[in-house]
Image (spheres, rainbow, N blue to C red):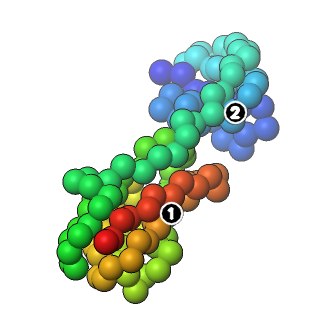
Amino acid sequence: MHDFLTVGAAAPLQEAAATALAVGENNVIVYDRNGNAAIAFVSGSPPAPLSIAASPSATLTTDNAMASLTVSGGQPPYSWTVADPSRGNLVSGNTGTTVVYRRYRNGDNAVTVTDGVGATASLVINQP
């Protein structure tokens, strides 16, 4: 097991957290159990773009119909908002990778997810 310390970090990162490096070049100091150190230069990759998938569909044709919405990409944590809550709303909370949307009445509606760094993606729920 190794501890990772990025230059300027407040505390060592465990192996599992080494994936939380900033985008771009990072200077990383790796310590072994004997206290020996090595410096590495590591590039952090940006997260995949945000996208929303609806299951079974993004078209809800009857009142009280529901769709499960799942975000992929981006960086947690995620928060969800609905453009017009009078047409439909989230019935399972507004955080996490998956939420449930319920249609209340006709008229298209948009659901937006925001990730931990402020990136957003929106999906239009078709409600004829």
Residue at 32% from the left image edge and 54% from the top image edge: 54
Crowding at dot 2, Cα within 10 Å, few <14 / some 14-19 / many 20+, comes out as few
Residue at 56% from the left image edge and 30% from the top image edge: 18
Of the pair 15 and 26, the residue shown nearer to us: 26
Looking at the picture, which amino acid does disc 1 mark? Answer: Thr
Please tell me in which quadrant of the rendered image residue 58 appears: bottom left
Looking at the picture, which amino acid does disc 2 mark? Answer: Val
Mark 2–mark 1 distance (CA, rounded to whole Å):
24 Å
Assign a secondary structure to mark 2.
Answer: loop
Crowding at dot 1, Cα within 10 Å, few <14 / some 14-19 / many 20+, comes out as some
Residue at 48% from the left image edge and 32% from the top image edge: 16
Please tell me in which quadrant of the rendered image residue 64 appears: bottom left
In the picture shown, does residue 121 fall above or below 9?
below
In percent of width and height, residue 5 lies at 67, 30
List the single residue furthest toward the bottom: 86
In the picture shown, does residue 78 fall above or below 43?
below
List the single residue furthest toward the right: 8
Front position among marks 2 and 1:
1
Of the pair 68 and 31, the residue shown nearer to us: 68
Disc 1: which residue: 112
Circles 2, 1 touching at the beta carbon (< 8 Å)? no
In percent of width and height, residue 55 lies at 26, 53
Sequence-first tag of 2 and 1? 2
In the picture shown, does residue 125 fall above or below 47?
below
Disc 2: which residue: 23
Residue 107 seen in render: yes
Q: Is residue 7 left or right of residue 106?
A: right
Quadrant where the C terminus is found in the figure: bottom left
In percent of width and height, residue 6 lies at 71, 31
Assign a secondary structure to mark 1.
Answer: strand
Residue at 22% from the left image edge and 79% from the top image edge: 63
